[in-house]
Image: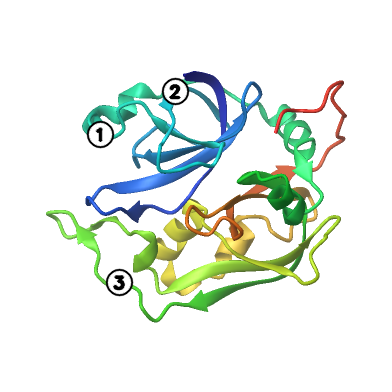
Amino acid sequence: MVIDDLIILGRGCPERIKNGRVTVCTAGYSPTHGFIRIYPTKMNMPLKRWSIVRVPVERNPRDTRKESWKIVGSRAEWDKLHEKVEVVGELKPKNRLNLIANLVDDCVEDIRKAKRSLGIVKPIIKKCYFSEKEDYDASTQLTLLGYPVVKTKNQFPVTPRIRYRCSNCKSKSYHDQQVLEWGFYEWIRKHPDKKDQVWENARIFSKKHEIFFFVGNLFQHRARYVIISVLRIPKDKVHKPLFPYKK
């Protein structure tokens, strides 16, 4: 199948899989197919947030989540996989809030009950913090010049987390979820002494922005959801579509 209208909404922090490849989980929304996850993807692919891309995909027999796909030839053609992704446009700023606001679920619990592995919620944030990781890998892959090429998720000593309730929460307690957004980890890597600024960078507490969480569950823990990306969009009026968007 070819998806030609995939709007990129988030990319997770890179991670290394068993065969040594460094991969990035990418997810977004297709007006034709609904929410889409593509894994694995390469770091150098043209998959920026709000880009609209065309990509050939096939089912991954190891991942039964209906939103999950892999790029055709992702293993055999890994070295030139980036050539298969074509940027065909961009979701314009004036259209972003209208799309995202009309895809919101009342609560993560509703996404779980609908057996969807991806969704969007409007959070009421209680706390932003970092949890310490005692078992992290302190090594870093280096270039010939000694500068870091990539730092994967398990090489960070801290994990950004957010405690929140949804706009119409069905949970008995706060959601407390890890943030996987790649930009958070890049900031921490480059500015370890200023890691608290990631919250400001994400406009978490901005009064001029609407904040949404693009969430997804984990492959090995389907009931557990994480924040793939923090979507921050300038406030404006929202118009209801004539027909509900496909989720």
Mark sitting on residue 55: 2
Crowd tier of the residue under label 3, counting other residues whose Cα lies within 10 Å: few below 14, some 14–19, many 20 or above:
some
State the SS at label 1. helix
Q: Residue furthest left?
A: 144
Q: Which residue is mark 1?
A: 78
Crowd tier of the residue under label 2, counting other residues whose Cα lies within 10 Å: few below 14, some 14–19, many 20 or above: many
In the shown orientation, is residue 29 left or right of residue 73? right
Query: What amino acid type is highlighted by mark number 3?
Result: Asp
Answer yes or no: is residue 161 visible.
Answer: yes
- Type of the residue with mark 1: Trp
Q: Residue 207: image x %, image y %?
A: 80, 55
Lower sequence index among marks 3 and 2: 2
Any part of residue 229 in sight: no
Any mark on residue 137, and which? 3
Q: Looking at the image, is 210 positioned above or below residue 132? A: above
Residue 45: image x %, image y %?
37, 34
Q: Quadrant of the C terminus?
A: top right
Q: Are marks 2 and 1 in contact (CB under 8 Å)?
A: no
Disc 2 residue type (three-letter): Val
Q: Residue at 73% across / 37% down in the picture?
A: 100
The structure residue drawn at horizontal position 84% and vertical position 25%, both measured from the top left corner, is 241
Give left or right: position of 125 versus 77: right
